Amino acid sequence: MAPLLQVESSTKRFGGLLANREVSLAIEAGEIVGLIGPNGAGKTTLFNCITGYMHPDEGRIVFDGADVTRTRPERICRLGVARTWQVVRAFGRMTALENVVCGALQRTNRIAEARARAGALLEFTELRGRGDMPAATLTLADKKRLEIARALATRPKLLLLDEAMSGLTPIETAAAVKLVRRIHEELQVTICVVEHVMEVVMPLSHRVIVLDYGVKIADGAPQAVVRDSQVIRAYLGDRRAAR
Amino acid sequence: MARLALVLGTLAAILYPIPLQIQGTTYYQTVGFLVLITAMLGVGWNVIGGWAGQFDFGPQVFFGVGAYTAALLYVKLGVEAWLGLLAGVAAAAVICAVLTYPLTRLRGHYFAISTVAIWMIAQPIGATWEYIGAAQGLFIPMKAHAGIVGSAVALQFSGPTKALGYYYSALVLFALTVALMAWVERSKLGFYFRAIRDDQEAAESIGIDSRLYKVLARSITAGVFAAGGVLYAFWALSVFPEQVLELNWSTLPIMATVVGGIGRLWGPLLGAVILIPISQIMSTTLGTGPLAGRGIDLIVYGLIIVVIAAFRPTGLLSLPWARWFGRRRPAAA
Amino acid sequence: MTELAQAVVNGLQMGFLYALVAVGLTIIWGLMEMINFAHGEFLMLGMFGAWWLSAGFHLDPLLAIVPIALAMYLFGMLVYQQLMRRVQGGDPFTQIFATIGLLFLLQNAVVAGFTSDYRFVNDTFLQKLGGVRLTLLGVTFAVPLLLAAGLALLLFLALYLLIERTEFGLALQATSEDRDAARLVGIRPQRMFAVAWGVGAALVAIAGAILVNFFSVYPQVGLQFTVLAYAIVALGGFGSILGTLLAALLVGVIQSVTVVYLPPAFKDAFVFASYLLIGLFRPQGLFGRF
Ligand SMILES: Nc1ncnc2c1ncn2[C@@H]1O[C@H](COP(=O)(O)OP(=O)(O)O)[C@@H](O)[C@H]1O
Ligand SMILES: [Mg+2]
């Protein structure tokens, strides 16, 4: 069977900068894939290309049998890809419930049905009781959960989480990891998580892909990837430089 | 509580001209007509401005499109005003959609200026196009009508009941507009408009076609403006470019919306009820004195807007009314 | 052919005047990203000031530039500190509304004080040169307009140097790019914004003092210039001083060439049609970088 998502040697340039360089990868239905790499490695850029906010300069992206290389974001969402944002983008002046209703309206035109589904998803993401609060007033952790609920409301096949855990406290991070597992198990959604904290991704992911300076340098089981010398150099080198 | 206010408000709006009419004054009926037309346009502008969050400075173009469409149909083909109104609304919505779709590539300030651009292009077209009467425009001849019903059907009132007739016509159109927009607000459209306003990229990520919904929002606004234009044209018995393409047709409703509360269904009505009578009161109190016609009313408008923008940009309706009145009346929502 | 060349030359000369009107907006809107719909009213105040100084004190508008620029510099700072500072952080719409309110306030305060009558400034230095014309290759240059264009160019150059070459200009740019970072290196953003408003108001008022040599003065004169100025700044790529100049020249040329072929009513329409066309193909403006 063909993979759910297939990226074929995608290249994205910003002027002279190569943000993604001939990146190829595949995500099978049912997987949790971790996408890691130091800051500026090109992870968000890859997400932007997959979700249609940018189009690769070269290469091809196929989702669920459809070529989406030049497709607009809203159509890609309708095909079954949902995402969250590294810097949270909730609809600040709408309530938490309304945020999720907007997502649910993707699959129904009936407001009552959308509300019911949104309520259930707030429950699922443990945001019960926050439904009537303006999204702008939520805490960062709650906003990130809200983004996940809103994305899930569109009934995605593939969910792309861009740093869903960065900026969270250890307790909040643990809760977020648990939420990702529940989305995978209970809703049967295929997931790709971007993180640069290795300790979070490793136990969660079935498979890990590593980007460095826009190039894919590793792709495999978490235990194998942590032992890869290139990864160690890219990662630990970067970390030391950062401190 | 809200329901009670609605019922009382409706009753007041229906009944207040009656004693005046019996006394033989028509002045306040005309003021009421202007208040309602401004409020109605404000409710329309709220769709693109308050909900979809796109600054539109050019809806007066569609006020003109509506007025010209209905006037042309009436003058050249003898089509009745209310049918002309439907045609005007449809024409405005379609023309707006065609013009706006390419513009939705532009964002923020660039979009706002592009709405001005269309207005700047519409003005000389209106002023030079012979078929629609160029700068002279079109005159709408009065026809004889059988009684009140005939007048109401033709949207042509004259004599002592002119002001009253147009007041009630405006009230009907305003009520229809509010009812329709209340429905829009609670429908998928309303949710999608506000999502685009709050974050366009995020809206696209959940499958909202931002360009399509911006076009829809602006076309709804255009439709409301067109209806207002038709009403105004039949009241004024004429349509000419300097009158219907006047910038005040957007600034006054926008100011009313801001004063009352942008993005709130009833905001424009509150704003119009406050602003429009100021002009009228000023022109009566200043009479023919030295300050008559010196824009004192507009100075007051300016002050009100500046104060609102500086201290309560969400408008008067956003003040904590429920808390203030809730203490005395626990039933308040 | 000469007709067209003449139109282009006339347009270029007008373009310099437009550039002057627009450049104040480049600072406030383009660089500091604040909206000022009362920009044309600042211009109108400059024009009225020049008229008043000329009618009351026989001061030539070119000399009136100095007191007018000073007064409007202070006025611009005042507007920022008393009004715009309050609305700066919030929704961009609020800035629009605040300055629309200001527009109504200023325009009608002048109506109240001076009525809506048209006024003319007569016997100015530039007007006295009105008869003098230069002819070059069959194209006539009106000397007053030429001098005004030269003046505009000079002011432009001064501003360009101020923004691009002085420490103050760099601080201004730094503030516009990142307020918090600017604060870290010891710049006081509030102060920078106030000065930017002062400079913007002074520049457009200077433009007003020059324009009274060619246009009549009345309280509503600002709007036509405001809309053009916004189109120019957007075309010029938002905050680029050189871009503003080029866009203004382009606008002047479009206007005067349009009038050769079409009724004068269309001269602004073609400017805005060009704005739309360019906007559709280059949403970042004609001379914008990104
Ligand atoms: N819109 C853009 N324009 C220019 N450069 C960009 C843009 N987006 C990202 N970049 C650059 O591309 C590189 C990769 O960025 P990004 O994909 O955000 O990395 P990551 O998400 O892995 O931290 C960085 O050097 C970044 O500065
Ligand atoms: Mg990133």
Image (cartoon, rainbow, N blue to C red):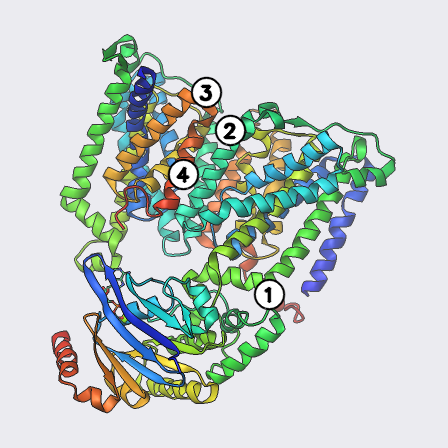
In x, y percent, where is residue A68?
39, 66
Q: Residue at x 65, y 37 (%)?
A: B69
The residue labelled by disc 3 is: C118
Tell me the distance, in whole angstroms, between the alpha carbons under discs 1 and 3.
51 Å
On screen, residue B26 above or below C185: above
Tell me the distance, in whole angstroms, between the alpha carbons under discs 2 and 4.
24 Å
Placement of the N terminus of chain C among the 4 image quadrants: top left
The residue labelled by disc 2 is: B124
Q: Provide the secondary structure element on which disc 1 rests.
A: helix
Mark 1: C-beta under 8 Å from nearest atom of ligand 2: no
The earlier-in-sequence mark between 3 and 4 is: 4
Q: Quadrant of ligand 1?
A: bottom left
Question: Which chain hosts label 4?
Answer: C
In x, y percent, where is residue B167?
73, 42
- Disc 1 marks a residue whose amino acid type is Ala
Residue, far right: B146
The earlier-in-sequence mark between 1 and 2 is: 2
Same chain, labels 3 and 4 = yes
Residue B318 located left or right of residue B29: left
Question: Which chain hosts label 2?
Answer: B
Question: Toward the viewer: B288 or B148?
Answer: B148
Mark 3 is surrounded, within 10 Å at the Cα level, by few (under 14), some (14 to 19) or many (20 or more) other residues, namely: few
The residue labelled by disc 1 is: B322
Tell me the distance, in whole angstroms, between the alpha carbons under discs 1 and 2.
49 Å
